[in-house]
Every structure is written in structure tokens, then in C-alpha cells.
Amino acid sequence: MKILTLIILALPSILFSNQVTVCIDCEYKSLESVVNDVVPGDTILISGTLTNGDRVVNLKGTPSNWIYIKGKDNAKYSGGNTGIQFSDCEYLYISDLTIEGQLLNGMNIDDAGTFDTPTHHIRIENCTFRDIAATGNNDLLKLSGFDDFEITNCKFLNGSPGGSGVDMVGCHNGLIANNYFENMGSNCIQAKGGTSSIDITRNMFINGGNRAVNIGGSTGLEYFRPQDADTESENITVYSNIFVGGQCAVAFVGTVNSHVYNNTVIGSRKWVFRILQETVDAERFLSCGDNSFFNNAVLLDETLSMTVNIGPNTRPESFEFSNNLWYDINGNTWNHNLPSIERNSILETNPDLTDKYGHDIYPTKSSTLVGNGKTLPGVTLDYDSITFVNPPTIGAFEVNTNTSAHFDYNVENIVIRDNVLHLSNKEYIKYRVYNYSGLLLLESNIKDDNINLSSLRENYLFLVLESKNKRKLMLVRK
């Protein structure tokens, strides 16, 4: 998987920061032991194998000086109850660690039960979570009361039969992108307990368990964040992912205003998706509805039980279905029986697909998928980080690149300091800023050499700069 990034991590201080090493033969033998001796801007290096779990409380960087926790020398937390638990932490960048073989959860990040002060601004990158030793409701990465976060380029392998790869309870404003999940139990990703505003994009799900992406779920009332949340989840977007195998690709469970689009689904064994309501209280909770499923390429065979499973206390008639491909790989006509009328569906006996990533999922330029998707609202990347054109190709891949506007990916002479983008190239006359779901946030003519992004909460932004004859697209990470 690949991603084009202009990486902005508030780095100026790192050149002068202190570095400390944690290992079994070092002065510091655990993360917990080093917490009181590091300050914002410092780097903690984890070396070798640690077999005792760590608990880190109140480790806090600042917006301009993050604390870096990086693995080296094949660093791993192996065994124990929980590998690492972070509570009430802020502005941490965690990378290059392996978490394996725990009896409870692999890594746990939470707000220590203080609902009004969530843990926030944590980035997890290039980590591996694998081979959990638990069999119950235990997770490789457990997140509770966690805001403004990113999980990118990680691997999640061999989860607990009753747990999730990534489990979110009351989490907000997050990005889960470019990760690989294989052999999960209940879920690869679960978003519940008042979770909102999460983008799940460009991930690969192989044998993703009972519900590869569970948008919602069932949460005890005392665990909701905020405490008065009226949905299990809302505003969850799932796009440009690949699902292979598993019982069900996506479940909408007590969620509203959540959207699943431009994914490729192959070989689900029971259902393509489910519509359920597991937390039922008509006086408090909204019923599952007002969601959408569009531009997805669904490739299945006769092993599928049914396209959709619908439970009670839901509003399936409020869902939008449009521009999906429904293809029986054995060439049969497929009656997919959706709960409301679908617009512009494609029922194909041969959609003209070729091999990519080990499966026949990539449309050729003559495929009926090309140019037949529902128009997307803004800048959106496909699984390979190629910009979708409008109208887009159906599924996780955009192949109609000949008609797309030319983007210059050279990011020289672009600098961000203190949330202000400084342009030294005078040729650009206009800019637009989108969030990761393609929603336009800012648009203006360039009046001077600076673009102020401080008003935007999002960590990841698409920035489009325009001159008279070209456009520059950048993925900016604040």
C-alpha cells in the first residue's frame, strides 16, 4: 500500500531533542520508568523484546513538540496481560513496534475513565499487532475515549475469536488508513459507544471475521462518550477498501449518517452487509438509518446466504443504494433483494476484471465499472492513492486516469509552521482545502504567501493549489 504525504509532525524541535532508550539491559527498563524524565520533543527508543506489560499515564507532548516512541532492533512487547496501556496522554507519535501474544488486549489507549478529558492526538504508524493469546472479547488495539488520532500503515494479524483488531468506544475524529487485517474474530474494526467522525479507507481486510467493519455495536450505557450520545456511532465513512472472505463485509448497527462507498467486496460467506439495532431505547437512541451504500463492486458466488440481513427496530427504507456492481463470479444472474430501490445498479455476467493483489478485482478500461459511479463530493483517493475522477469508477480502483485533471505531486517550496502554510512559489492563484472524506472546508484566492489552517480540527487535509495551467494536490498532515 502506498500513500502520498506531505508529512507535518511539528518536527523543528526533534533535531535538538533528548533521546532515551528502553530495553531490558538499559537504565530504563520500561516506558513507565522513563515517563518522569522526558519532556515534549523527546524521543523514547524501545529496543529488543520486553516481556512485561507497560502502563503509561499522563505522558504529554504539546502541539508543537510531540513525544516520539519508536521501536528499533526489532522492538516488541511479547506476552503479558496487556502490552502497553496509555491513559490520559496527549501528542504522542508511536511507530515501529510489534505487540504480540497478550492475554488481555495488545495495546490499550484510554481516558482513564475521565470522560471530560479524553486522550487525544496520538499517531500510530508502522506497528504490528498479532497473535493475541486471548479467546474472549479481547482486542489487538483497544481505544476508549480517544480523539483526534491516526492509525496508518499497520498490520493486524490473528485476533481473538471474540474480539476486534481495532475496537473503538466513544472515539472521535480519527483516521484508519492503509492498514492490513487478516484472520480476525468478531471484527477487524468496530466503532461504537458514541464514536463519530471516523474515516476508514484504503485498508485490506482478509478473512475479517463475523463483521469486518462493524459500524456501531452494543455498548453499556456507562461507557458512552459523550454520556448523552443518542447513537452507537455516526458520520463513519468506509471507502476505497478491499474485503476478501469473512462472514460479512460491513454491518450498520445503531448508526446514522454513515456511508460505505467505492469498496471492492469479494467472497463474503454469509452477507454483504447487515442492518441491525442492538442498543434499543426509543426514548433515547435513534434507530439505524439514513446511511448509504454506493459505488461498491460486489463479487460473490452461490456460497452467499443472502445479500443483506435486516434486524428489527431499524429503518432500512431510509438507506440510499446506488451505482453498485453485483456480480456472480459463476456468471449467474444475481437477485440481490435490497430493502429499498437502488438507482443505477449494474448486474453483470462479465464486468471485465483483471488480477491485482492476487484476485480478479481490477477493472480494465473497457469495464462497465469505469465512469459509472455516483459523483463524489470532493477529492477522494482510491486504494492505490489515485484520485477518483467524476464520475468515478465503481469499486476501490480508479482506472479512468486519462480523463482526470493533471495534478503535479511535486511538493517543493511548501512549508508549514504553526498551522500556517507558507508558499514560496508565486504562481498559484487559488486554493481549496478538503477533509479526508472529500468535504470542501476552505476555498479562496491566494492573496499573499501564507494560508492559515489553524481553524481546521482535522489532522489530515487535502490541499489543492491552482495556477492558470496546472493544479497541485497534496495530502497534508498537520
Image (tube, helix red, strand yellow):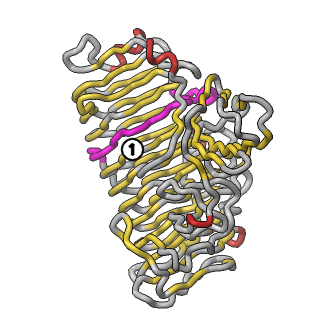
Magenta highlight on residue 170: no
State the residue in front, 30 or 4: 4
Specify the amino acid type for callout 1: Cys
Q: Which residue is mark 1?
A: 154
Q: Residue furthest bottom?
A: 332
Residue 238 in sight: no
Figure check: 281 above or below 448 = below
State the residue in front, 140 or 292: 292
**Residue at coordinates 54% horizontally, 49% vertically from top-left?**
191
Figure check: 320 above or below 228 = below
Percent x, y of residue 465:
68, 43
Decide if residue 441 is on the left or right side of residue 130. right
**Residue at coordinates 59% horizontally, 81% vertically from top-left?**
346
Find the magenta span and give its range.
112-134
Which part of the image, by quadrant, shows the C terminus?
top right
Percent x, y of residue 95:
39, 33
**Residue at coordinates 27% horizontally, 31% vertically from top-left?**
75
**Residue at coordinates 68% horizontally, 55% vertically from top-left?**
378
State the residue in front, 474 or 87: 474
Q: Secondary structure at mark 1?
A: loop
Magenta highlight on residue 113: yes
Decide if residue 230 is on the left or right side of residue 192. right
Percent x, y of residue 460:
59, 40
